[in-house]
Amino acid sequence: MIKLLKLNQLYTKCDTSIFKFRTTEQLKITNKILGQDRALNSIDTALGIKHEGYNLFIMGNSGVGKHSLLDKILKEKSKKDFVLHDWCYVNNFTEDTKPLVLKLPAGVGTRFKKDMQNLIKNLQEKIPQTFKQKEYITIRKNLEDKMKEDQDYLFYKLKDEAKKDDIFINDTTSGITISPLKDGKTLSAEEFQSLNITQREVIEKNIIFYKAKVDANSKLEMAFSKSFIEDMKEIDSGFIDDVVQKSMKVIKEKYKSYENVISYLDEVEDDVIENFEDFTIDENAGTENPMEALFAQNVDQSASFEIYNVNIIVNNTKQKTAPIVYEHNPTYSNLFGRIEHVNHMGTLTTDFNFIKAGALHRANGGYLVIDARALLFQPYSWEGLKRMLHSGEIHLETIEESMGLTNSVTLNPQSIELETKIILVGSRYIYYLLFDEDEDFKRLFKIEADFEDKTFRDNDAIISYGNIIASLIDKYSLLPLTKKALGRIVEFSSRLVNDSTSLSLDFSSIIDLLHESNLIAKRRKAKTIKNEDILEALDSRAKRSQRIKDEIYKEIKDETILIDTNGSKVGQINGLTVIDYGNFVFSMPVKISALTRVGKEGVVDIEREVDLSGAIHSKGVMILSSFLAARYSHDFSMSLSASLVFEQSYSPIDGDSASLAELYTLLSSISNIPIKQNFALTGSINQNGQVQAIGGVNEKIEGFYDVCKLKDENFNASVIIPFSNIKNLMLKEEVLNSVRKGQFRIYAIKHVDEGVKLLMDIDAGVRGASGKFPKNSLNYLVENRLIEFSELSLGKKISK
């Protein structure tokens, strides 16, 4: 049954009478989510399950509001059932290359850092003061006096003993000297030489003897000094222990409920007592010598106190909800943190103070949102994320370390437990690619939220759609829409999805159209956006993008590209193709021709033979061969050589939407019945001759209309489309006007036979009870011609 489509089937207008407002300014702002119930349920499930592996992958086309909807949901979820922590790194006094991590309630990290700073500052003041106390000075002086007294006693005792043997021992600035005496006076060199040999030998012997005595005394004096130092260490320790313990007692009492902090403070206490000398360094030392002062600036005097610092890598003091982190540049270091280095006197150095947090650290206890495509494009980021999720820990290491490519000594910080819900946002292609090719993915991302591209169009949905658009207008401070303008937006939405029964959920395209229409309305100093502004914006958008279309259409008008829109021809038909250039899609008719003859090659697709045909197009041509054989050669072997070609087509072709047109071309060539050239058609067929839906039906119809008008303003033309594509029709106003005038017609068919009468002015014919087609029907002519081909090929008659 052939169906000539009526105007209301070509364009489904929006009934603006359902709008109970004058302009959208009167509508309430809404946060209602339209048409995403399935995705919402998935997100709710993923966020509600705390078990490992229930991370979330959000997929769908761009512009459907994935990010804005997710952001809204996360902000609501982040207010409930969350526990915030500060994450800090501190020095490991046992092994300083392995910093320790402190997990503290939010806000405690900041207080602890400040308390540690005050503690060290307090010790820097108190420890030096300890050694200035009268009690300490007295004890030290007494010990020093005792040591000096013991040392002096040894020296003077030896000195007196030597004097009896005419030897003088003197303590000078250059050291201890030993000289001979005579009559209580030291001998000069000349006087010593004037002595006889016996006297000199006695003196030399005595000098050697007392030299040994002096050496023995020096050892005893060193023993006194060592004893003094050890005694002082014990005394110092007693004084320091008292000061440090009193200072530490306050901070330990404050943090007694945090076992990890107390353990760390015990290590701090031991280190301060062991290295208390660092707290007694004279700040003015070396200032008299400029070089010494310069050197002092580069020594570790200040660095020695930095080991007591608290490096808060995640500070949640001011955070009132669970953290929501969007990482737009998911490099390895941006995700998992890094360890920075500083140039110290030509050498790169680092310590726990240079550990910096990554997005995974900042999102701990909350949600981390990452663009899947950006993640996969960053070297090792995806593998690193999987490794962290598997272990349940954030382990800070460089890419080189994770790959085992470096042997240099660096920091190996203690791992942080991972309590983050990971949300990847990407396309369906990326989701299924990962699902099929990465075994880890399906275990780590068990929930997917697939966002709809469109929703069913009824009055309730249209009213909700209007409220959403009113909210967008308010958000972007645009002029309000009139009823008709809103109706036109609704109609544009259906055109976006090529479905008159649906509304597009691609609000980014809607927003773009609103901005452009708003500019046009403002230029005419209007207070509202009218239907005319929307139409002008759509027209302007088309004109600025159609340079290539205009060039191609000019070649058609100049007959460089041969397209016939009048008369009839055998084996030629107007097919319809869609050309997609970035953000502009248009259609143009293309001449499809067929030649048939006796042979065994079957249907030859010239496009395929020259590698210009895609797999789907080739499949469509093979279906044609199957249809011909099944319908016409039940009782004989078909001997047919046929060639199909898209004339003046020099680019790759794919899709099966031309298979219906190709079949009519073959039937025309075989039967020698001409096809009307003022027709164009699109559709695919199956092996039974049923016509199937295709894509881009609006653009294809409009493309043929444009070419017909281009070649002759007074044209008379028609387009045949699949019946199942009727619901996709949302044609532009210019085409509708031409249909109103009866100048342009659109027919819809369900089976290949239905279009025969329209195209060739002949009945298709149905095989009767006798098994034969009616005489002079198309099917009769085709079958007879194929029998003739076979007879010519076999050289004998075939029984009919």
Image: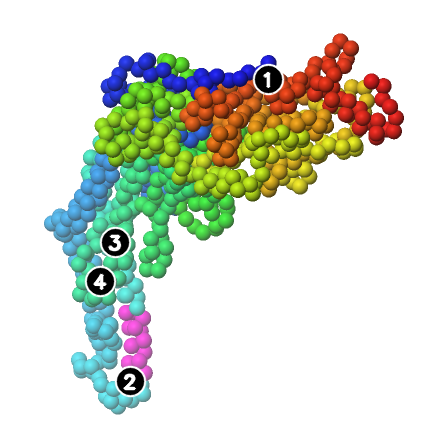
Q: Earlier in the sequence, mark 3 or mark 1?
A: 3
Circle nearer the viewer, 3 or 1: 1
Spatial separation of the CA atoms under disc 3 and disc 2? 61 Å
Residue that label 3 marks: 301
Q: Secondary structure at mark 2?
A: helix
Which amino acid type is marked by label 3?
Gln
> Residue at 73% across / 32% down in the picture?
596
Q: Alpha-carbon neighbours of circle 1 within 10 Å: few (<14), some, or many (≥20)? A: many
Q: CA distance from mark 4 to mark 3?
A: 12 Å
Q: Amino acid at mark 4?
A: Ala
Residue for badge 1: 750
Viewer-proximal residue among 453 and 252: 453
Secondary structure state at the residue bearing disc 1:
loop
Q: What amino acid is labelled 1 in the image?
A: Lys
Marks 4 & 3, CB-CB < 8 Å contact: no
Residue position for label 2: 199
Closer to viewer: mark 2 or mark 1: 1
- Asked whether 210 falls inside the magenta stretch, the response is yes
Q: Which residues are magenta?
A: 201-214
Label annotation for residue 349:
none
Measured from the top left, where is residue 765 in percent x and y? 69, 16
